[in-house]
Image: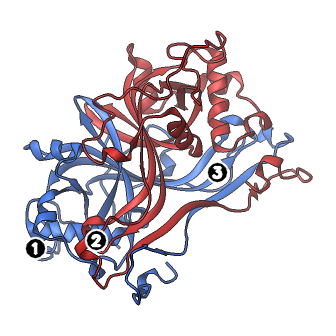
Chain colours: A blue, B red
Amino acid sequence: MAATPQHGEPPQEEGHRQEEASAVYARTDRTVPSRDRERAAYDRESVHAILDEGYVCHLGFLRDGAPVVLPTLYGRIGERLYVHGSTGSRPLRTAGRADDGMPVCLTVTHVDGLVLARSGFHHSINYRSVVVHGTARPVTGEKERRTALDAIVDQVVPGRAADCRPADAKELAATAVLSLDLAEVSAKVRTGDPNDEPEDLALPYWSGIVPVAPVYGAPQPSGDLRPGIPLPGYLVNF
Amino acid sequence: MAATPQHGEPPQEEGHRQEEASAVYARTDRTVPSRDRERAAYDRESVHAILDEGYVCHLGFLRDGAPVVLPTLYGRIGERLYVHGSTGSRPLRTAGRADDGMPVCLTVTHVDGLVLARSGFHHSINYRSVVVHGTARPVTGEKERRTALDAIVDQVVPGRAADCRPADAKELAATAVLSLDLAEVSAKVRTGDPNDEPEDLALPYWSGIVPVAPVYGAPQPSGDLRPGIPLPGYLVNF
């Protein structure tokens, strides 16, 4: 069930260390919520599934002591996440300057439904989220950098990285890649009907769930796409 | 075009101050991105439209000096955003303790498409996001607290707040509400085709956009919904 953790070493470079992996992430003070604890999960399978269903995260970091939250793409390889950006962008510059890495919080959220209770108080949403606390570090080895960039592309469309032009030297030099190990991490999931108070069940208000999910439309070729290039297999019925 | 700003005063409590509102938010060092500046927008109309299309934000704050990013619901009234939570939850407790409020960054992101370029480097997503920097402050007046809670419910389903039971005294006491003024704020928008390099146009790779949008399914009544309660008008064709 659990993937092999690779803390502190680049994946696929020094071979696969066959450590005994725990099926769950260790709980820490930061990953145990102060309430709704029954919604929290720490097993790798749940965490990986939520991460693998997404490709946009919200990355939190500090700038001049204040929090900044930016949406960005990510990729996962085993127990390590990667984000990337221009070497000129703020979070990447900040992380690159920091010898000890940059404290970050990386959050991925899927919204599954609107929860309409009889009371305003119990309105909510059904969702699945993963929150990763840790230290983002610049990835410097070219092999891991390339593997990470492929993982980010494949996170968006699985199979795509092998079907496009890889980064050339100039592009690689202009791209900063940060890694963040999955160590201090938890999932949080809400499912099911509204949690109405028993005494509210007789109220005359409709109550229930409005499901929501991202839907992908038919791929739209670029205006300058060369004639005769078919839609790739990984985009058919995407 | 622009709404009336209400910095520093609760909306709908002291009447509507008819200030001359600028159509744009003032740029600051934090809201001008270090790159892709052409994607940034500062006009209130664009910012409000992006905020109003969403209901889940990612709220960044500090805990013990490290960033934390959590998904949460929000509501907008004029130039003020509101978030809420249990008085026992961490960000709300933290803000409640801070006399000067809590530095936060609140980000709302809509993903509109996957951008598949001929090169891995130019892969991206089409998106619209708003990033708000500022100080979250506990809302203490009952009238503003109720108005804020209604706004959060109506942000999820417009019209719903008037069609459910309002918070009772006990629920209100258990709920913390934070406000965040729209002052230091920017939008960022990417649209259109991949930005391929001219020399890549001859490559044999498919290139284009995969559109994506949230789709809402048919409302599912609670298992314990009283018979005879029809689907409310605001949910028909939601």
Q: Separation of disc 1 and disc 2 at Cα?
A: 17 Å
x then y, percent, for residue A82: 25, 60
Quarter of the image for residue A212 reads bottom right
Marks 2 and 3, the one that precedes in the sequence = 2
Quarter of the image for residue A144 reads bottom left
The amino acid type of the residue labelled 2 equals Ala
Q: Residue furthest top?
A: B14
* Frontmost residue, B149 versus B117: B117
Marks 1 and 2, the one that precedes in the sequence = 2
The amino acid type of the residue labelled 3 equals Leu
Name the image quarter holding the N terminus of chain B. top right
Q: Residues within 10 Å of mark 1 (few under 14, many from 20)?
A: few
Q: What residue does disc 1 label?
A: A13
Residue A50 image label: none
What residue lies at 29% left-to-right and 40% top-to-bottom? B33
Q: Is residue A76 visible?
A: no
Discs 1 and 2 share one subunit? yes
Q: Secondary structure at mark 2?
A: loop
Q: Separation of disc 3 and disc 1 at Cα?
A: 44 Å
Q: How many marks?
A: 3
Q: What residue does disc 2 label?
A: A3
| Vertical position of residue A159 compared to residue B59: above or below | below
Contact check, label 1 and label 2, Cβ < 8 Å: no
x then y, percent, for residue A178: 19, 55
| Vertical position of residue B139 compared to residue B208: above or below | above
Chain ID for label 1?
Answer: A
Contact check, label 2 and label 3, Cβ < 8 Å: no
Residue A114 image label: 3
Discs 3 and 1 share one subunit? yes
